Amino acid sequence: MPREPMDLMQGTLDVLILRTLAWGPMHGYAATRWIRERTGGTIDIEDAPLYKALHRLEHSGCVSAEWGISENNRRARYYKLTARGRQQLKAEESAWRRYAAAVFAVLEPVS
Amino acid sequence: MRRLFKFPWRNARDIRADVDDELRFHIEERTSALVAAGLAPDAARTQALREFGDVDDARRYINALDRGTESAARRKDYLGELRQDLAYAFRKLRSSPAFTITAIVTLALGIGANAAIFSVVNGVLLRPLPYPHAEQLLKVYQANRSAGNLHASVSPLDLDDWRAQRTVFADIGGFWYSDGASGVDLTGDGDPQRLSAVFITPGFFTTLQVGAAEGRLPREDELVRGGPDKVVVLSNGFWQRQYGSSPSIVGTHITLEGAPYQVIGVMPRNFAYPSDRADVYIPYSTITDDMIPRIRPVRILDAVARMKPGVTMAAAGAELNTIAARLARQYPEDAAWGETTLVPLRDDITGNVRAALLVLLGAVAFVLLIGCVNVASLLLARAGVREREIAVRAALGAGRGRIVRQLLTESIVLSLAGGAAGVAVARAGVGALLALSAGQLPRGADVHIDGTVLLFALALSLATGLLFGLVPAVHASRAALHGTLREAGRGVAGGARRARSVLVIAEVALAVVLVVGAGLMGRSFIAIMKVDPGFRPDHLIAVNFTISTTRRPTGWQQYYHAVIDKARTVPGVISAGATKDAPFRGNGERDIFGPPGYVVKAGEDPPTARMMHVSDGYFQTIGARIAAGREFSPTDRAGGPHLILVNESFAKHWFPGEAAVGKSIDMAPAAINGKSEPAQIIGVVADIRQAAMDEPARETIYENNMVNGRVKVALVARTAGEPLAMARKLREAVWSVDKEQPITSIETFDDVVSESMARPRLLTVLLGAFGVLGLILGALGIYGVLAYLVSERQREIGVRIALGAPARSVLWMFVGRGLALTAAGLAIGLGGALMLTRLMSGVLYGVQATDPLTFAAVGSILLAVAALASWIPARRAAHVDPVEALRSD
């Protein structure tokens, strides 16, 4: 994969996961399904990069992980947004909104 | 949120298992979801895997990442806990200032004293000499095995031969320096002065590999006879004192012994060999044959040698012995001198203080150990108070390791604070030590608190903290973990009581060793004080000067006597005389003689004795006792018969059971120069301690200075009043005979004796102080443990008293307990002292290292102190009011 889009992808994945976990603690499977359903198949995201992103965010302290019991009684690793993760989400969200607004401003047909 | 419970840290395998679990969970969940949606299991699994992407890559990536996350978290957690522990420790220590201050002061004294003594040991014994590759430097002596003399000075001619024939030595050099004896007169520059000179041979500076700080050092051709110019190198101290460190002095000429010498260089500030009292370095070649004959039997030089890199001392010794043996075969006067003795230069310089310093270091370590025991016992007492707090922490899930770590953090904070304060103590201590040692310490200039000493203090503090903290911490944690909250109390108290008893026993044992050491040193000092030096130092003063034979080639003996006569006329002077070497200021000359009937045998050296040169009236003046016959009189002049006195040691050895007076000995045994020189003994002098208070007199022959004179003069005078008050009058008396006479120094014998006692006094003072400190700390330990016991058993005592136990029996119960602990400590301590004080025998005088009197006295003192320390809390127990005691709690 070329370098530039990868960076963009990484950043995008991070913000998607942070936003997802903002709903509440969930395990990796739930988070990836949630993102997949939310994007409605528009973006084809594999699960592997999402897991990588989860652990990356754990490493940088944006999420914390703990083993818990899943809905069907299995041992699952639950992720939770930390205070720092919440801050990060806020910062990235606004950056994304500004970015999208700028792109839309360009795309808006001249009337 | 602060976690109360923590999962154990994960290792690499745990992480791998966790990652596998997580990924498997995802695939299986997805597969079963697809199966539920109607796919066949195999197809479902395949699709789940496809949706996931590269599983192996993800596994690898996540594993690596998680390992980093884990260790970062671990580090952060650890630092967090440390910060927590530190904050907690500071809060706890601040909340009990009495305990904290007691502990810190105890530790500051202990660590400070250790750092101070260590900085002396480091500067004097450990640090290399300030020369490049100092480990290659040796001091070389000529050895005469048949005479039992293995550390003799070296003949200049032999030294030349050694140097010429050497192969494993980079260089060999020699010098003649004798405090007070080797000197030159400086004139033409203010008041005439006697300078302390080091006369050096070629190879001296090149062996040490030092360079000049200013100018240059002598070339080889300037160090041999017939050199182009007379040159002199100044010591840094003299340069500073006399010329204000002006570089322009280099290149000019100064007048020494009435002759011009060119100043060619100045030594560096830290160069203090062979002594920091040396003023100038002058070629030995300037000494003419009529001053000191240049013949092989004149062994006068000190020799230093530098081994080539990689050469062992054994190889160096073998080569010098080979050369010496060759010379012994070649020259009859060297026949008995076929060997050499090599000593590492540093050991040679510091040899005589090594034992004293190591004894001090050992003693001061004991002080610190006692301090540690005391603080440990304080901590144990606190642990009793804190058992509840610790039990609560344990109940809340703090592991045992965690509690130990917390408590150890506290003790290490304490010990580091003590260490920091200790460095301040050490600074003061080093200053005091150097002042007390009064120039008796070789390499004193190398003693200061440097990085090594600070590191030592830091290491000592950490070790101390662990030492006194570990036992109480482990104790507290064990008790806290083993009991419920309620029971914890009793568990700790019982264990702590036992632990404190052990500590008290250890403390007493340590104190016993220290006090025995101090006691032995004290006895030794008293023994030295009681020594009869053979003269009366009070009201005695010496004016030291040297008669210049350059200025006064003839008639100097008349001058010598004129000065003594002049001194005798000074009002306030009772009597006056003169000697070459005043007591403690020189040990005479070693020379051969022939006892009556002596026949020289081939290959056997004639006997030797110390030769002293004294004037008439000398013995009367210094207050020596004439045991038989008489001392020299003014009428014993040159031209008459050769008359001598001997001391009692000499008389006893050579004339046992008969009168020495009237006997004759040969002052020049025939073998050496062919003509005998009989001298008649006219008197026997009671032994005079000449070298030092603690060194018995050697066999000595006294020559009449009027017949066989020496230019070095100590004019001694017994005064009616305060001797120092006569200093000016005596100096003026000398100058009234010759106003150009340089005077080396004027000193009272009270000062001379006091200086010669500096080392034993310093050792006695320090060991005494350490001993008292050990005793006090030991007594406090006993007091503390009993006071604690009494307060703990208040109720029980109350019951006993209520049931009619007499106060006396309660009193004895506790005193008995204190004495039992002391007795146990005493037994261990006396045993230890018996083994350890043997190491002191090198610094003791007139007392055995196993002196039973000292041991018995120390035992009684300790028992008495322990009885007192136990009696105070015991009395409180005996006066317990049963009603009060039973009502409380």
Image: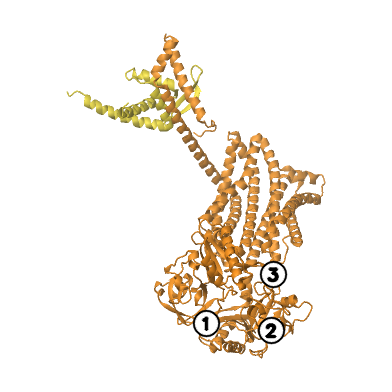
Chain colours: A yellow, B orange
Q: Is residue B459 above or below residue B77?
A: below
Gap in Å between the C-alphas at discs 2 and 1? 34 Å
Tag on residue B528? Answer: 3
- Tell me which chain the residue with mark 2 is part of: B
Question: Residue type at mark 1?
Answer: Pro
- Tell me which chain the residue with mark 1 is part of: B
- Tell me which chain the residue with mark 3 is part of: B
Mark 2 and mark 1 in contact? Answer it, CB < 8 Å. Answer: no
Is residue B244 visible from the viewing direction of this image? Answer: no
Q: Quadrant of the C terminus of chain B?
A: top right
* Residue receiving disc 1: B742
Q: Residue at x 51, y 28 (%)?
A: B13
Q: Is residue A47 above or below residue B807?
A: above
Q: Nearer the viewer, mark 3 or mark 2?
A: 2
Q: Is residue B437 above or below residue A19?
A: below
Tag on residue B302? Answer: none
Tell me whether marks 3 and 1 sit on the same chain: yes
Q: Quadrant of residue B536?
A: bottom right
| Callout 2 crowding tier (Cα within 10 Å): few <14, some 14–19, many ≥20 | some
Question: Residue type at mark 3?
Answer: Ile
Of residue A86 and residue B317, the one placed in the foreground of this image is B317
Q: Where in the figure is residue B363, as x and y percent of width and height? A: 64, 57
Q: Is residue B261 left or right of residue B495?
A: left
Tell me whether marks 2 and 1 sit on the same chain: yes
Q: Nearer the viewer, mark 2 or mark 1?
A: 2
Give the mark, 3 or 1, whose residue is nearer the N terminus. Answer: 3
Is residue A103 visible from the viewing direction of this image? Answer: yes
Gap in Å between the C-alphas at discs 3 and 1? 35 Å
Describe the element under mark 3 as helix, strand or loop.
helix
Q: Where in the figure is residue B580, as x and y percent of width and height? A: 61, 80
Describe the element under mark 2 as helix, strand or loop.
strand
* Residue receiving disc 2: B679
